[in-house]
Amino acid sequence: MDKQTTETEEHIINENAGDQETGVIEQDSSGKEAAAESDKAIIKTEEGTESFSEMYEESLKSLQEGELVRGEIVKVDKEFVLVDIGYKSEGQIPIHEFIDSEGNSTAKVGEKVDVLLEKRESDDGLILLSKEKAAKIKIWDDIKAIYEDDGTVTGKIISRIKGGMTVDIGLQAFLPGSQIDLKPIRNFDALIGTTHDFRILKYNKRRGNIVLSRRAILELQRASLRDQTLQTLEDEAVLEGTVKNITDYGLFVDLGGIDGLLHITDMSWGRVGHPSESYQVGDKITVKVLSFDRESERVSLGLKQLKADPWTQAEEKYPVGTRIGGRVVSLADYGAFVEVEEGIEGLIHISEMSWTRKVRRPSQVVRVGDMVEAVVLSIDSTNKRISLGLKQVEPNPWDIIGEKYPVGTTIEGRIKNITDFGIFIGIDEGIDGLVHISDISWTRRIKHPSELYKKGQEVQAVVLNIDKENERFSLGIKQLAVDPWEEVPEKYRAGTRVTGTVTNITDFGVFVELEEGIEGLIHVSELTKDKSGSPLSRFKVDDVIQAKVINVSGGDEKIGLSIKRLEETEEKEIYKSYLSHGKEATSNLGELLKEGMINLQRESSSQDQEEQVSLEENEKEKGGSADESSVETAPEEIETI
């Protein structure tokens, strides 16, 4: 291990570490003087007449200021601790040097203690000693020995300074930021107060500088672990490691000196959003070695491989029809994915979410994270697919709606929607019935349902039909009343004179309303021409006119009318009236004229009978249609006599 830091670290060290003078002066000359004094103290004079006191004085001169000595505590008071070091009087040490971090005194009478002789005799004749300075001198000796032997020292990180941390090892030492760990440290403050072992990179006793390294120890440990890991590392091996780093694509795991990659696809048989959702740096994890390349030292790891593939037993565990619970893990436009268990997800298609609601988006029914219950509709272990149904958990309301509302039942509900083709009425929760525009009124011509109804209005209707397969419910409003066309054939028989109002004029005829909702058609061929030659020119909308019923079709809801035949009938009635009230002619000419008129009347009556038969035959063949093809041509005009 190199014991020198980089130039940058030396600059930081010199900038942050102050000169910490110990006040201890090591002088070779003082040592020689001490030896000389000792020699003088033990020299025996030729006469042997020196007194014992003189010899004692000479021996005390061997204790030099700045020297380490060992003494015994003889007294402890509030301000000082008295220590006997073998001098003519006891030395004293300030009591604060014996106070620990909790404020308690550690000094005990009779206890041996190493001290530094600061001054043999002060102005007051006292011997001044220091326990702390003695400890520092001893620590420097220990630091020198540890440095030379490549040993370690234990210290506590106490503060953060520029470029690194301050460590208390008995003396304050500097720990550069690059020497804290094997990887860059982001949160320095988290290390304050922690205790670690360190290597001494360099020290300077004169300046009081000590540079430490924790990284050096970690590198040695890592190298040792690496050797051990390489002996056990092989394919299919199961090892325990520590999460070292987290990325979008997986985890880097420290197996002991060697890092392996646990890819996100090998973390679980199920869905993994991001590796950080399951693990954090420093977590312990057991993994399986999928592959190991000794040349490149690349290790691929797997976590899900420690368990069997859940799809192998899926068909036995989840047969069709099974009701299961799961958590919604994701939503798509076409449905929701539900995690049945780790590694097995099923799809609830949007069409399988509700019996009655028209679901356009899955988010209308479920959300990510929801716990749902569903029924297995199909399962394919080979392709790892399960189809689930949400609506199958509840009975299908369409299966019982027919029993609840049989055909012919009168129901009452609120209009939920109005369209061009009809209105939707709410029946049961999620089930709406449609009243088609053609089933709103028997007689009234409706262009749009909004002419009669509004959204939210309460209405009654009759159940016409229920289609369970296509989930359609047909209703009718007009069926609440009797069809007026059932009475039309009896009320408006052929030959009846009727009065009505012109409602519409077309190229092929005139429509006349006989009563509310009942209209008849006067075909253009059944109109008499006016002076202009156009049969339609003399009519206007809202004109009140009379006509003759020539045919009726209740099934087709059609009535054929004729003005031409009505006028012919009127002419005949006038003629008959003339014949019955005319005076008897006296001349042969009058008799001849009367006879001719009688013959003409017979011919006209015969023609009317033939026309009536023809109309009945046309009505049977063509259903009594009142359009252009169904109206009979008018008979020839009676010749003017």
Image (cartoon, helix red, strand yellow):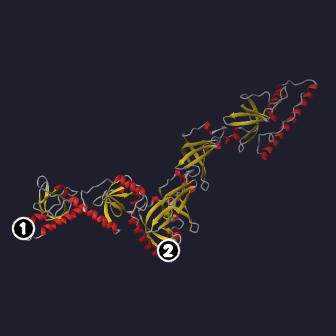
* Residue denoted by label 1: 50
Q: Residue drawn at (70%, 34%), measured in percent from left and top?
A: 514
- Indicate left or right for 453 with 74 as reference: right
Q: In this image, 290 relative to 638: left or right?
A: left
Q: Which mark is residue 236?
A: 2
Identity of the residue drawn at 51% across and 52% down: 365
Instruction: Give SS at disc 2.
Output: loop
What x and y, as percent, mark residue 458?
Answer: 54, 41
Residue 502: where, in percent of width, then height?
A: 73, 31
Regarding residue 268, the answer to whether it shows in the image is no
Disc 1 residue crowd, few under 14, some 14–19, many 20+, Cα 10 Å: few
* In this picture, residue 54 sits left or right of residue 606: left
Residue 252, horizontal then vertical, whole percent: 47, 64
In the image, 219 versus 394, the foreground residue is 219
Quadrant into which the C terminus falls: top right
Q: Nearer the viewer, residue 390 or 569?
A: 390
* Amino acid type shown at disc 2: Glu
Quadrant of image for the N terminus: bottom left
